[in-house]
Image (cartoon, coloured by chain):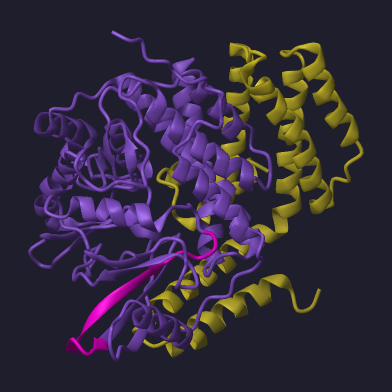
Chain colours: A purple, B yellow
Amino acid sequence: MDTLVQADPWDRTVMDPRQKWVLDRTLEYRSKGPYRARTSDEIAAMLSRYFDHLGYRDAVISNVRRMSGGASKEQFIFNLVHADKPEGERLVLRMDPPEGISQSCRGREAQLQNAMIGTLPVAPIRHVDTDAEFLDQAGSIIEFVHGVTEPTTSGAKGVSGMGTRFGELSERLAPQFVDAFVKTHGLDWSQKDLSLFAKPRAGTTDAALWELNFWSGLYWNAIVEPLPIVTMCERWLREHVPVCDRVGIVHGDLRIGNFMFEEPSGKFTAVLDWELGHLGDYHEDIAWTIQRLFGYLDEDGRFLVSGFLTREDFLGQYQRLSGNVIDPAKLRWYEILNAYKCAVMDLGQAMRVAEGHTNHQENVMTWLGSAGAVFINQICQMIREEI
Amino acid sequence: MLPSLDVRFRNLIKSVQEVIAPAIPDDEKLAQEQVRLVVGHLAMMQEQWKNAVRFEAGSYRLMRELAEGLAGLVDEGQAADLQASLEQTRATVQDDIDALNAAICTIGAAIDRVILGEDGRKPLSPDAYRLLLDYGDKSSLRDRVWFKGNGIDPDRDSLPPLKEIL
């Protein structure tokens, strides 16, 4: 049997080519200077041009409204009436600002969402303009999905769903929450159109190293003020890159706030935000969702993952239902990688965006930046346990 | 100072909460979210402004101590790099927040170079790791206390008061 050649963990060029494209495009957008949020009229005019180009006859756009939430995209809900659908329909424009807390590719997101149709509830993608050929920024047109990401009675007004409490709905949401991980990681992706994704080799460090190189590339391109712990963390990660035994779909942000459900049934209507999705190691998703920030302590002082299950229950149920074994050493590496990613987003990219005014909501950037030390603290705690 | 910064912060918050927020239509969710963030930032800044220079000076001291400590744990060339950054920033004026931040960046850049060790070609010893982690514990505690008002830190209730970390 051939021995797989492992990449040099310090080779920063080893990366999914499309992710390199994302990094390059980020610098290109940044060089254009401050961004001004588009008005509803401007969005309506832009959408009219787009639907004309797509061949819709007599397309009329109306009732354009900005949607709240999210730290990386501009989203608008609008009505579209055209000759083949005179009764009209509600659609969503999901568009890149020049820069956000993370950077991604709308085409990859669309491919992943389409790949998940029939496996998980996802919002159908109608059209995607990956390279901003027709829209002002890269974007996609998505069918509107009814539901909420937090109970309407919760009163939660945190950023990106953090701090939400689900109360009695927890019992109905928790099984669907675990199921979303099981189905995402269990999907046979080999026959899906994932042409915008490079495939890391099973049995190598490709999956881990590609991710690390993307995020460290984003950080070094964004750095505003040196952060020794972020740099130390990168070094530790490079010195301990794990092998991925089984390559599958990784959502990248599967957690509280990215599930839409109906009230009062609690039935999931959509799993949202596939923008950080890629082919990689399932440990990455598991390690992401068990972070302290995406859960809370119950009245007995037990930490609940996304507010649903204890860590032990979540890991146990996931392993039983998926058949995937959680390797504690790999889980720890991805926990540290994920804390690193959060620090890069909050203290690197968000700070660069806030300084350069290249987003439509810099107040969110600095708000998230003010939370960056939480991840620095977590990095220190975890690496101290490993040395 | 008339009008004082405290009064102006309080009045800014009052006007946003009592005049601007109610004028935003119910379906303008992004505008509503921005208003909440503006109030949140103003409230934090109101708590922070009197100590901002002292806080930055503390960050500078911690970074300086880290560089001094690391200099004894790395090779000669790396130690010289750290010493040069320390020398360059030795005369930093302690009540000038911009000068303090510039000094932090100068020393921090030298520390980053040492940590990366020419992309792994130079080792980073366990003692150096431990020194960095000690620094990280102290600096992240200070920053978490400083930004406790954002309400995001899951352990915010166990954080010490601001006066203890300045």
Which SS type dominates the magenta stretch?
A: strand
The residue shown at (17%, 46%) is A180
- Of the pair A341 and A2, the residue shown nearer to us: A2
**In the visual, does A316 lie left or right of B78?**
left
Residue found at x 37% / y 47%: A196
Q: In the picture provided, is A213 more to the left or to the right than A180? A: right
Expressed as whole percent of the image width and height from the top left, the position of residue A69 reads 38, 66
Up-down relation of residue A28 to residue A294 (above or below): below
Question: What x and y, as percent, mark residue A63?
Answer: 33, 88
Left or right: where B84 falls relative to A241? right
Q: Residue at x 67, y 48 (%)?
A: A224
Would residue A95 be counted in the magenta stretch? yes
Give percent across and percent down for residue A144: 23, 72
Depth check, front residue: A363 or A107: A107
Q: Is residue B130 visible?
A: yes
Identify the magenta region.
Answer: A81-99
In which quadrant will I find the N terminus of chain A? top left
Above/below status of B159 relative to A382? below
Residue A329 in the image: state x and y as whole percent.
34, 19
Query: Any magenta on residue A123?
Result: no
- As displayed, is residue A12 above or below residue B34? above
